Image (tube, grey):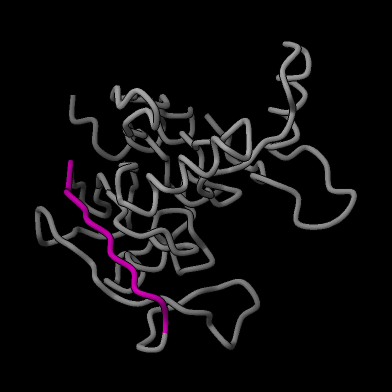
């Protein structure tokens, strides 16, 4: 359950405090190995459930599940504006934005990207949505909803209004996948962090 504001892994030499490093410390304290392999990624300011492998072999098995579409990733997001459709699919390729060092955009020459969503609630100015990824491009959910004209709340990189959120309102809520050896279904849920709870209560709690 990665907190917002934490990188998954170091991007440069000497960088400390990443999720991979913190988990490695935890495993060493337990007397286990400390070779940590992220199976997928979450942006620094996205919170929630992420799958890590504790060995190269485990990573190979989990990566195969990911490539075969057997790891189901469900997110909860709050977007600016009122989405008209109750559910939908965004099928739009994503590539780098040549005018910005980190931003992505929808472009015909980008990599295939497919996002499914369903609206859970609407307020006067925002929509609460559950999102499922079919692909895993960098910033995929953020780029796709920006493309629809509904950037995520707090996501200033893609034009979202900051308001109550000091980051993008995006939380990796649930991971579901078959155990790669036993095939038993594993279902992991990460509770909403405090900032997401405050935003949802302020916008959508009609009690």
What residue range appears in magenta?
A: 110-121
Identify the residue at horizontal 28%, vertical 25% (top origin): 185
Q: Is residue 7 above or below residue 104?
A: above
Q: Is residue 47 magenta?
A: no
Q: Is residue 111 above or below residue 186?
A: below
Q: Quadrant of the C terminus?
A: top left
Of 200 and 185, nearer the camera is: 185
Please state if 144 lies on the left or on the right of 98 as rendered: left
Give the quadrant of residue 180: top left
Of helix, strand and loop, which mostly describes the magenta segment?
strand
Identify the residue at horizontal 34%, vertical 67% (top origin): 144
Q: Position of residue 200 (x, y in %)?
A: 33, 36
Identify the residue at horizontal 69%, vertical 37% (top origin): 20
Give the quadrant of residue 108: bottom left
Identify the residue at horizontal 22%, vertical 56% (top origin): 116
Of 196 and 113, nearer the camera is: 113
Query: Among all residues in the image, which is located at the extreme right?
Result: 14
Of 29 and 86, nearer the camera is: 29
Please state if 193 lies on the left or on the right of 207 as rendered: right
Q: Position of residue 175 (x, y in %)?
A: 36, 34
How many numbered markers are drawn?
A: 0
Please state if 38 lies on the left or on the right of 189 as rendered: right
Q: Is residue 185 above or below residue 200?
A: above
Q: Position of residue 194 (x, y in %)?
A: 48, 28
Of 50 and 90, nearer the camera is: 50
Q: Position of residue 73 (x, y in %)?
A: 34, 43
Query: Among all residues in the image, which is located at the extreme top?
Result: 30
């Amino acid at each position: 359950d990665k907190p917002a504001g934490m990188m998954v892994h170091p991007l440069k030499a000497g960088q400390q405090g990443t999720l991979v490093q913190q988990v490695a410390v935890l495993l060493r304290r337990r007397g286990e190995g400390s070779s940590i392999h992220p199976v997928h990624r979450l942006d620094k300011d996205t919170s929630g459930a992420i799958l890590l492998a504790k060995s190269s072999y485990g990573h190979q098995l989990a990566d195969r599940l990911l490539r075969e579409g057997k790891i189901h990733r469900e997110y909860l997001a709050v977007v600016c504006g009122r989405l008209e459709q109750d559910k939908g699919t965004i099928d739009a390729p994503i590539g780098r934005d040549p005018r910005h060092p980190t931003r992505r955009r929808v472009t015909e020459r980008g990599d295939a990207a497919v996002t499914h969503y369903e609206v859970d609630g609407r307020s006067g100015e925002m929509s609460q949505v559950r999102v499922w990824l079919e692909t895993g491009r960098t910033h995929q959910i953020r780029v796709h909803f920006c493309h629809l004209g509904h950037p995520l709340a707090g996501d200033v990189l893609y034009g979202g209004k900051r308001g109550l959120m000091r980051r993008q309102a995006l939380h990796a809520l649930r991971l579901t996948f078959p155990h790669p050896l036993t095939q038993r279904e594993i279902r992991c849920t990460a509770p909403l962090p405090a900032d997401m709870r405050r935003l949802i209560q302020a916008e959508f709690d009609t009690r």
